[in-house]
Image: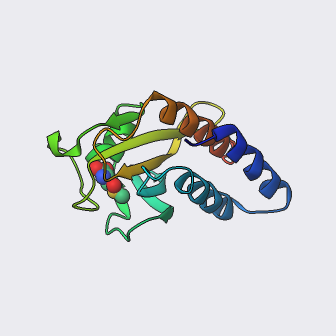
Amino acid sequence: MLNGAALVARLDAERSGGADREELFRKAVEGIEAASDRYDWVGVYLLDGDELVLGPYVGAETDHTRISVGRGVCGTAVAEDRNLNVSDVRALDNYIACSIHTRSEIVVLIRDARGVVRGQLDLDSDLEAAFNDEDEVELGRVAGWLGTLFSPS
Ligand code: SME
């Protein structure tokens, strides 16, 4: 299980050591991916206008480097201003497949100090219903910390 507080402590140390935002995003997705065998793809998308733009990720290469707000699980989370935990992506009409093996997906939003959405953590699993409330809480700790890397909009 991911220990969000422990990862945040490591990220804090990296930040104090001078790591820039891109490096910190990379360390975050690597740290998350290493925490559980259930996490098959872990990435950061950053909001740029009405598009999500792919940042650092761990897992299979994806064509979906830009996703419009409102499209797919990622874009829907932004449009609805909430985290999404989808236990079976095959049940969705509005799903953008990155891998034919993916069965479940969780999106946890990254917000700045004003609560404005700046991006998201996106995780895919090849297992159905791979993500539970504890995953969302722990990922939320990391997303909360990543939100501090943005100056308030
Ligand atoms: N499945 C996502 C697209 C991103 S990939 O999972 C990396 C979606 O439906 O928005």
Q: Is residue 15 left or right of residue 29?
A: right
- Residue lying at 46% horizontally and 28% vertically, measured from the top left: 133
> Is residue 71 something that shows in the picture?
no
Q: Is residue 82 left or right of residue 115?
A: left
Residue shown at 62% from the left, 42% from the top: 142
Screen quadrant of the N terminus: top right
Instruction: Give the x, y percent position of residue 38.
Output: 42, 49
Image side of residue 72 versus residue 13, left or right: left
Residue 83 picture location, percent across and down? 42, 33
Comparing 68 with 96, the one in front is 96
Quarter of the image where one finds residue 113 = top right
Specify whether residue 26 is in view: yes
Q: In the rendered view, would you say 38 is above or below 152?
A: below
Residue 137 is drawn in which quadrant? Answer: top right
Q: Residue at x 58, y 41 (%)?
A: 143
On screen, residue 123 above or below 20? above
Q: Position of residue 19 (x, y in %)?
A: 76, 63
Closest to the observer, 12 or 51: 12
Q: Position of residue 88 (x, y in %)?
A: 23, 41
